[in-house]
Image: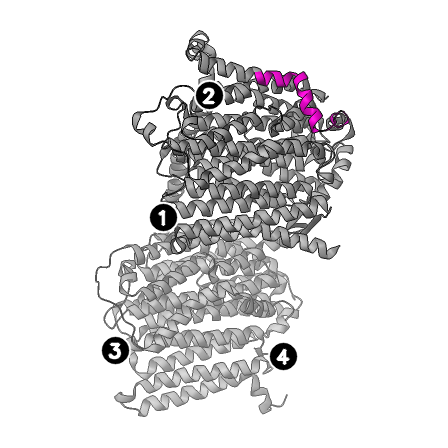
Amino acid sequence: MSFTLSQLIPAIPEVFVTIMIAVTILVSLFLGEKHRNATFYLTQATLLICTLLTVNIFHHQTQIAFHNSFIVDHMACILKVFVYAMTFLSLLYAQPYLRGTELGAGEFYILTLFVVLGMMVLISAYSFITLFIGLELFSLPLYAMIAMQRTAVTAEAAMKYFVLGSSASAFLLFGMSMVYGATGALTIPDIQNAVLLHSPTIAILGLIFILAAVAFKLGAAPFHMWIPDVYEGAPLPVTLILASATKIAAFVLAIRLLVNALPLLTNQWQHMLIFVAILSMLIGNLVAIVQTNIRRMLAYSSIAQMGYMLLGLVSGIGVGFGAAMFYIIVYAIMSLGAFGVLMLISRTGFEVHSINDLRGLNRRNPWLAFMMLLVMFSMAGIPPSAGFFAKIAVLVALVHVHLVWLAALALIFAIIGAYYYLCVVKVMYFEEPEETSLIEINGLGKQLGISVNCLMVLVLGILPTGLFQLCQAAFVGG
Amino acid sequence: MTTSSNFLSNLALAIILFPLLGCLIAGFFGKKIGQRGAHWVTTLMVGASFFLSIYLVKLVVFDNLTFNGAIYTWGSSGNFVFDVGFLIDRLSALMMLTVTFVSFLVHIYSIGYMKGDPGYQRFFSYISLFTFAMLMLVSANNFMQLYFGWEGVGLVSYLLIGFWYKKNSANEGGLKAFLINRVGDLGFILGIGAILAFFGSVDYATVFSQAPALAASNAMVNIYPHIHWSAITVICLLLFIGAMGKSAQMPLHVWLPESMEGPTPISALIHAATMVTAGVYMVARMSPLFELSPVSLSVILIIGGTSALFTGILALVQNDIKRVVAYSTLSQLGYMMAALGASAFSAGIFHLFTHACFKALLFLAAGSVIIGMHHEQDMRKMGNLRKYMPITYVTFLIGALALCAIPPFAGFYSKDTIIDAVHLSTVFGGTYAYYCVLIGTFVTALYTFRAFFMTFHTEERMDQHTRETIKESSAVVWIPLLVLAVPSIILGWVLEGPMLENLFGNAIYTASQYDTLSTIASDFHGSWAMMLHAVFTLPFWLAIAGVFCAWFAYVCRPQLPAVLAQRFSTLYTVLVHKYGFDEFNNWFFVKGGIRFANWLFRVGDIKILDDLMVNGSGRVVAWLSAAARKLQTGYLYHYVLAMVLGVLVFGVWYS
């Protein structure tokens, strides 16, 4: 059990981020006002190098380190890369906005790196302890980031998120302790192989609490209440990260805790997930329709989309998990694209809130309008977008396990959902703008970023095979 | 052998693709190449096809070469393979020759007829496209390609009937033709579907080789519960419905007279010589299937006989010169169908060939008259045109004599053979059909010479201005007339012998118990003898009587028709209303359809779909949304409560 340096190899990206956090703190401390951008560039560079490091260890087989509490497998590598990419793009979109506010100081970027580190730990966690550490590591900085801009609205959002998030953490800990009580194990492979010591009731009770926490982090009903308030209240740069990267992390939480740790209780969590999924699709889609605030609308849409994603887990088969993974990646890309467009339209002192702020966007910036159109079509599941393919894959998995009624129900909700997505398109293309001034995006990087981001939605819809097979390989025969 | 069959398929491909090339050039580059360019390129292309077809016929008929094979796989689905392929045998080679021959002459003729028309290039592009589609149809070796050609000619027919699209009647005529052909095509595609279902293939050779086994196995189709029909009969009848639409057999004939709204060369090419005979060709091609089903033979015979007589009678009351010829086309198509029903497939195709020549001649001659009369088509405003248009006069007369089956003209041989064959037919309905086609010869002669006398003899009834400007049409118009007059005279005399002696080889199959033509062949002692024998037969004298009656009623006693019309006013009214088919269709299908559609709109669309389903579901969703959003109170403790409740629900559920 002696520790050797080679055991650190799987965790090299995490180690690197930790070092870079320290470096960035020091740099931002000693650099003057003039060089504020340095922290931004350092952060982005960190993310890029992390991508390289992670891709580099991707070639190896699944590695487990630190006494079964840390894992680097296919899923972890792929999702980490997407977390970097999402964060990278979020910061790219947010940078000009941040520069103009008190958020612009180095702290925002440093906290972002902490969030990334937390998500990385969570994604690679292979025991209850590391899972919980990762979860808290990425949640706590987020509470702070929301509250950084001191207005009544953000304070309310931060307060709600903090209180509810803490409750969820409490649920999670409580559930974990019960599972520990039932199995006597803390690492996931041990729990997986454990014969339930006593009656399964305790384990099931633990499962219920764990599932509640997972649903909370995903933002699935009935644990979704924080989503609209936080998405609306938080500063847009934080919402960008909340709506994209953290969804991926929450997905991993679900996979590790339900699929990897508790296959013995598959029947039970399947049933609970059906309930959660239906409720999410129902509430998400229905309430999204009546929203006039686009951020709340997107928040409810995310609740509904999480419902669809959970259908992949409901299927209980590898193909379904792969489909769900594909779905969460596609969703993160779409969501980032949608909020990214909002971010780019917003300026210091003006944040997009109402759907009507998008009126006549086609006149004011046709390319941005087209990007938003792609994202909206994809969210509605209109071919040939990635969203269509992701929905199909999930529904196919459901049909595989003879849950046709559920697939049909999901389709009906998808039709209802198409309404509010298309409304956005209608507003952008067929209504007169209140202001006719053109919206310009300064900087090639941002233009390139949003274009790649949104066109990905189309590319992944036309050529989904590569990513889809990667996702499938993470679960089927991987 | 392989090289020669390769050569044959390449030759056929060239024949088919030349007109397509011409069509594309004239269609897409019409503006660039101008009117002269358009007619030159299309005419040359079709001309090339025509001369290659002569060579093809030489290879197939005299050198006994055949080709049957796929040249391109169009698509496959499961076990079904759909090829583009050719079946080049005597039947299809001769059909290709006929099509390219008439088409070539019509191209030349159109140069004169369409002069100055704003849609000149479009017109030439269309007729070349038609030639391509028709060649695809006749050369097909499978049902899919047959259907492709079938729909292709239907489409061009629609486009050309409505060619003068600013004229309302032309648009209506095109629409009518299109819709009625839909009815036929529905039967046709169902027939092809049934073939695919029973034989698992759309390839002619496969289907024909398996057909006897299917017939012998007494396979049944369950159409309604407890009603079983023989599969082969169902297939044949469905295919025949397609033929009825395309070849304008009663009661699907109503579109053909309306099709006369198109330019006259089109009437000659599409609605007389080629496209409308596609149904006849198809039934003959499917002879191995139809011979297995006596029921369908009877149906064909009865419908053919009925069409032959009753549409001919209608021609008696028409005053539009083109409509008279159009009704006569209906009647002649009936003759061909009757021949097919009597299993005299060769005779039917033979009549198709001769009819193509003399009917094209009649149409083009009528067109020449119409040019001379400055687009006046009413015969009551013509008269004594022989003085002004001698070439047209002579060629029209030749066509008329051929149509009336006066020996030695072409129509005599083909029609006389048909009448004999129907007489010998033993299937149910044979006797009825025989009397129909027999009386039909009298009617044919009567209406043909009625038109002939009214147009070219009797006193001049046109107005002064027209009279002064009538002159013979230009050479591009009358040269095709002369060229067509030649086969109208001799084709029957030349082909009668070979036709009875198996001109079509294996392409046509006749079961021994229905083989009427072999009986006729055994009595055949050469074309001369047949001609001389004609004076002892009934049809000949009926035709002569028809000509005489026409002369008497329209030249000697011009007031007689009016008196007769008054005396037999009921009959006359029925005829003028064309037996009421149009009225019935109009009342039942058009008005009924509109009423039904209105009802669907009011009840189905507005009430059920719009109010109940679309707006209703929308209202439900809106109501639910309004209710659901109330849950989002904004109070932190409500949110926590929701989470706790969620956990409680699961807890209660599972413990």
Residue indicated by mark 1: B627
Asked which quadrant contains residue B508, the reply is top right
Chain identity of mark 4: A
Q: Which mark is residue A61?
A: 4
- Looking at the picture, tell me which residue is in the foreground, A138 or B596: B596
Amino acid beneath label 4: Gln
- Looking at the picture, tell me which residue is in the foreground, B194 or B128: B128
Q: Secondary structure at mark 2?
A: helix
Rounded to the nearest angstrom, the CA distance separating label 2 from label 3 is: 100 Å
Q: Is residue B523 magenta-colored?
A: yes
Q: Which mark is residue A100?
A: 3
Q: How is the image coloured?
A: one colour
**From what the image shows, is residue B589 above or below residue A51?**
above
| Residue extending furthest toward the bottom | A30
Q: Secondary structure at mark 4?
A: loop
**Label located before the other in sequence (1 or 2):** 2
Quadrant the C terminus of chain A occupies: bottom right
The segment highlighted magenta reads B520-544
Residue indicated by mark 2: B453
Closest to the camera, between mark 4 and mark 1, is 4
Rounded to the nearest angstrom, the CA distance separating label 2 from label 4 is: 99 Å
Report the side of B603 relative to A154 (left or right).
right
Chain identity of mark 3: A
